[in-house]
Amino acid sequence: MRIAHATDIHWFVPPKLLDLRSFKRTLGTANLYLRGRRHHFPEVVQARVVEFLRALSPDLVCLTGDLTSTALPAEFAKARAALEPLLSTIPTFIIPGNHDVYTVGAQREARVQAWFGDWMFLGEGGIGMADFGTTTVLGLDPNRPTRISASGVLPQGQLQALEAALRRPDLAERTVVLAIHYPLFDRMGRLYDNWEHGLQNVNDLVAILSAAPRRPDLILHGHEHRGYRSELQLADGVRIPVFNSGSSGYANPAKDRGAAVNLYRVEVGKPVEVERYLHGPDGFAPEPGGAYATGR
Ligand SMILES: [Fe+2]
Ligand SMILES: [Fe+2]
C-alpha cells in the first residue's frame, strides 16, 4: 500500500475584530503578522499540495493536524473547501493539531469534528481508528487550548483506548500506523516533552507502546515544521520508525525551505520504505539524494 503524509498546512484567514476577544488568538495573530509567518504559508503552495496529493494517487492520505492557523470557522471552511477534491476522491485519515483547537471556543464548539469528523473515525475513548485495505490507522488527539504555551497532553481515556486497540487480535496480519500531531522525539532524538511545545506525557505513550502486544509499524507526526525522522527503540529491541514529513504548506525561500510531503510503501511484515517530496519552483519533486538527505 502507498500512504501519503502531509501536515501543518495552516490555512489562514485574517481574524475580524470580534475574533480578537480571544487572548490566545490575538497573541497568535500578532505572531503571524509581526514575525511575518503569515507569508510563509502561501496559498499557491497550499493549493499545490492538494493537487500533488491527488496526483500521487495513493491508497491513503494521512493528514497529521494544524490544518488551520487559529481555528477560526472561516479557516475551517477554507481548509475544507481546499481539501474537497482530495477528500472526495482518495481515502483520507485526519487528526487535529494544536492550532485546530487554538481557543476555548474552538474546543467547546468541537469545530474540527464539525468540519472534518467524517475523516477522523472517532470511537471509544476519543481515538480515531479505521481500516484501509491491509492497514489500520490509529489517531490520537493530545491537543487542547492553552493560554500561552503550545504543549499537549494525552488524556487518560485515549491512552486506555490505545492500549485496548493494540490488543485487537487481527492486527497481527495488518500494517499498523499511529498518527499523532506531536513528535515523540525532537530532531536530536531527545524525548519531546518540553514545557513550551512538547507532549507533556510522552512517557505514558512510550510506556503503552512498550507493553503493547502489537506495536505500530510506523508513527506519523507533524507540529515541528521542519521535517525529520526519528526512531522509538523499545527495551526488547523493537525499533519503530517515526516520521515528520515537515510542513506541507510552508515556504521560506530565504532560508531555502519548502513544503514537504512523504510517501510510504508498506507491506505487512516488511520494513517501511519512505520517499520524500519537496516543493520548489517547478512544484513537488523527489528530495535529491533520498528522504531527508538535504536536511531541509
Ligand atoms: Fe504547525
Ligand atoms: Fe502544531
Image (cartoon, rainbow, N blue to C red):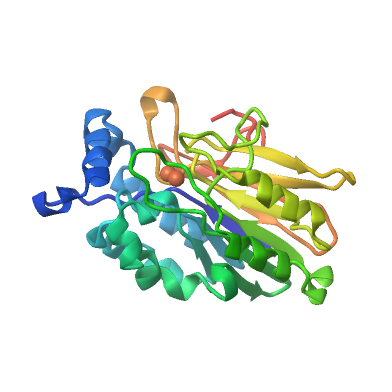
Residue at 73% in and 40% down:
231
Q: Could you tell me residue 256's position as x and y percent?
A: 44, 26
Q: Could you tell me residue 263's position as x and y percent?
A: 62, 52
The residue at the far left in this view is 17
Residue at 83% in and 71% down:
173
Image quadrant assignment for residue 129: bottom right
Q: Compared with residue 234, is residue 51 higher up or lower down, i.e. above or below?
A: below
Task: Answer with left or right where residue 152 lies relative to residue 204.
Answer: left
Task: Answer with left or right where residue 36 lies relative to residue 163.
Answer: left
Q: Compared with residue 90, is residue 214 higher up or lower down, i.e. above or below?
A: above
Residue at 53% in and 30% down:
296
Q: Compared with residue 199, is residue 61 higher up or lower down, i.e. above or below?
A: below
Task: Answer with left or right where residue 216 lies relative to residue 169.
Answer: left
Residue in front for this viewpoint, 148 or 169: 148
The residue at the far top in this view is 254
Q: Compared with residue 267, is residue 33 higher up or lower down, i.e. above or below?
A: above
Q: Could you tell me residue 178's position as x and y percent?
A: 65, 58
Is residue 121 visible in the rendered image? The answer is: yes
Q: Could you tell me residue 91's position as x and y percent?
A: 54, 72
The residue at the far right in this view is 236
Is residue 47 visible in the rendered image? The answer is: no
Residue at 63% in and 43% down:
184
Which image quarter has ligand 2?
Answer: top left
Task: Answer with left or right where residue 227 lies relative to residue 279.
Answer: right
Residue in front for this viewpoint, 149 or 180: 149
* Position of the N terminus by quadrant: bottom right
Total numbered circles: 0
